Amino acid sequence: MNCKYTNLQKELKENCILCFIPKNKRGFTSSFDMTAIFKCIVHKLKTGCQWSFLFVDIEGCKPPFSWQTVYYYYRKWSEKGVFKEMFETYLEIQKDKLDTEKLNLDGTHSLVNKSAQSVAYQHRKRGRTSNILIMTDGKGIPIANGGIISGNHNDLFQIVPQYAQMIRDLKNCGICTENSIQNADKGFDSKNFRRAIHRRKMFANMVENKRNRKTNKRGRKRFFNQDIYNQRFVNERTFAWMDSFRTLLIRFDTLDSSWLNWHYLAFALILIKV
């Protein structure tokens, strides 16, 4: 299991992993090593292998449990919100290292090879996809995400409630977004989204989408800073980080909640290394 996300020191395992794993309130105590099970889950996230082939290429690991046990604990921890809590906790701890003066918003599609929730055909990807909105700071560190939506919708589909939820989650983690500049491409340019940004005392920095407008927009010019807008491309580096987690490339999970928890775990692992 040669992966920097699994080769963690003992102190880091106790402080960053075991403290989030829930213990049974009644009944017997599991004899399995929860750290080893967590490492197997991370291995699945990084390699994208099938659950039944989980122990084929893990080096130096002969666990006393089966892949069904690892799958059981992943589903159990996902339902209890362990990975989301882990991500929010690391985000609150690392908030002083984040650049929240400039925020970037973009969506990413993942191909789907089986029937699942929130899936539809996307012409640009030439396949059935699921889409998720991801917000990053000025350095490209993921700090918030929206819900899972089907690939046939554009970026503005339910953008206001999704954006409101992302800002709410950031405030719950102690991150202030007032006077921040929100970068987004012209696909997000809409009156409702700009109003949602301004209501939160933020500045919308996005290229105006003229669509079919034949004349110039009336009124004063909107705020736009080209230099800050060019820094939006740190998102491409973020998506490259996410592509290194092979499970996020192609979706095999049927439930949206299970698919979303893989993202929470990936974001948490990125924040550990900040």
Image: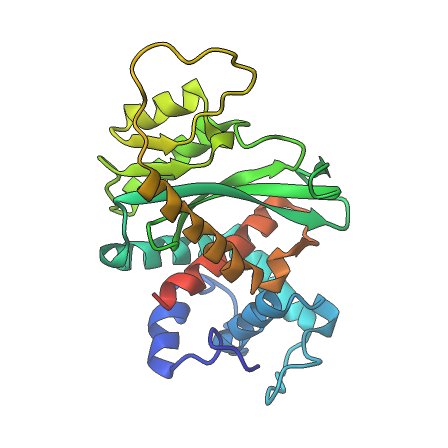
Q: Which residue extends farthest front?
A: 215
The front one of 75 and 103 is 103
Q: Specify whether 20 is left or right of 28.
A: left
Q: Would residue 22 be seen by someone viewing this image from the given angle?
A: no
Report the side of 148 relative to 96 (left or right): right
The percent position of residue 228, horizontal first and vertical second, equals 32, 43
- Give the quarter of the image for residue 97: bottom left
Query: Which of the image's four quarters has the C terminus?
Result: bottom left
Residue at position x 56%, y 58% in the image: 76
Residue 199 on image: x %, y %: 29, 23
Looking at this view, is 156 or 147 the one in front? Answer: 156
- Who's the residue at 29% across and 15% down the image? 220
Up-down: is 181 above or below 61? above
Question: Where residue 67 appears, x then y in whole percent?
Answer: 68, 72
Mark yes or no: residue 182 visible. yes
The foreground one among 234 and 216 is: 216
> Which residue lies most toward the right here?
114
Task: Tell me the quarter of the image containing the N terminus.
Answer: bottom right
Considering every residue shown, the one lying at the far bottom of the view is 60
Q: Compared to 154, does 82 lie above or below?
A: below
State the residue at coordinates (50%, 21%). 210
| Image vertical order of residue 60 relative to residue 245, above or below | below
